[in-house]
Amino acid sequence: MNFAVDIILAFGLDLMIGDPERFPHPVRFIGWLINRLEKSTRKIFSSEVCGAKKDTQARCLCYFNERIAGTVTGLLAVLISAALVYATIRIANFADPVIGRIASILWLYMGLSARSLAESAYRISGDLEHDDIESARKSLSRIVGRDTKNLDESEISRGAVESVSENTVDGILTPIFFALIGAFTPVGAAAVMWAFKAMSTCDSMIGHKDEKYIRFGTFSARLDDVANYIPARLCYVLFPAASFILGYSPVKCFRTALRDSKHHASPNSGIPESATAGALEIRLGGTVYYDGIPCEKKPFGGEFPAPEKKHILQSVRLMWLATLLMIAMTVALSIFLPKDLF
């Protein structure tokens, strides 16, 4: 019962406060930690033959060392992040159990990003409503990695809707999922939630396919895929249910997700994006540009028209309701599952 109350209070704080811009978010510390770990592990696991790359054997050794360094970086970032959260709550508990409870709720709150995601989308929508295409492009560039300087209104709307749907999973549903798992373990909900937040940050920072990280970031990228696997598939239920309540199209939501989710390079991101495409009956996905280079992708909901600016707010409503359904499901499970589950 304690966890049920804590996660509801944490979500309430996120709903009311969000992420204050002037408050240093813990993810920034995780980012700093990853940078420091990367420098150290690359140095420790580097080899003299890596610089020369004289032959195939030397290159193989170099590549192997890179993967080991990246694996150690990812594991340490996750373990240290979880340990620090656990330690702060334990210390607060020594002072007073009430303070420890408050500390746990605050960590849970900081691990959610529903309001900040919604505010980013509202900002883009507001720019488009005022016909300020340049501001809309800049606002979109803060939440996506693609080129935005030449996008038109429909393409900006598409980018915003895709970002909202994708981040609903790794920014909201998966943290809640890991918090639920943590509630049944000795380390607690907040520590396990922040273990995932570290995984996600590692994937964002080093889980790339460029020359620098193609081997170093493999472990972090795969770990993030595994972590999001179940929450992403909950979208097959949560998004159609939310669509039904909101008066969108639950049948097309489920059908499009089932049919088109495989079009995404990620094993997880395609599910919420294609589900959103079906729910709102719009075409998402397709070609995007990164540093001027086109990346060809099959669309989600190819039979539907291109999105308009009104669909940004509709995607946010879908996100909010899917989040509420996830909270409700989590609370129910935390109450009725046996306490010694793990």
Image: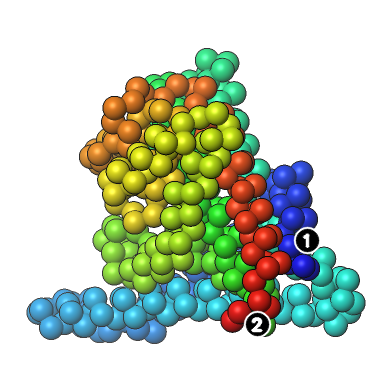
Whole-percent x, y for residue 281 in the image: 41, 28
Tell me where residue 29 sits by quadrant: bottom right
Q: Residue furthest left?
A: 55
Left or right, 238 with reference to 89? left
Mark number, residue 5:
1
Residue ID for mark 2: 340
| Within-10-Å neighbours for mark 2: few <14, some 14–19, many 20+ | few
Q: Residue furthest top?
A: 131
Residue shown at 90%/77% (left/top)?
A: 96
Residue shown at 59%/35% (left/top)?
A: 245
Mark 1: amino acid: Val
Mark 2: amino acid: Asp
Mark number, residue 316:
none
Residue shown at 46%/31% (left/top)?
A: 249
Of 58 and 293, the residue lying toward us? 293
Tell me where residue 5 sits by quadrant: bottom right
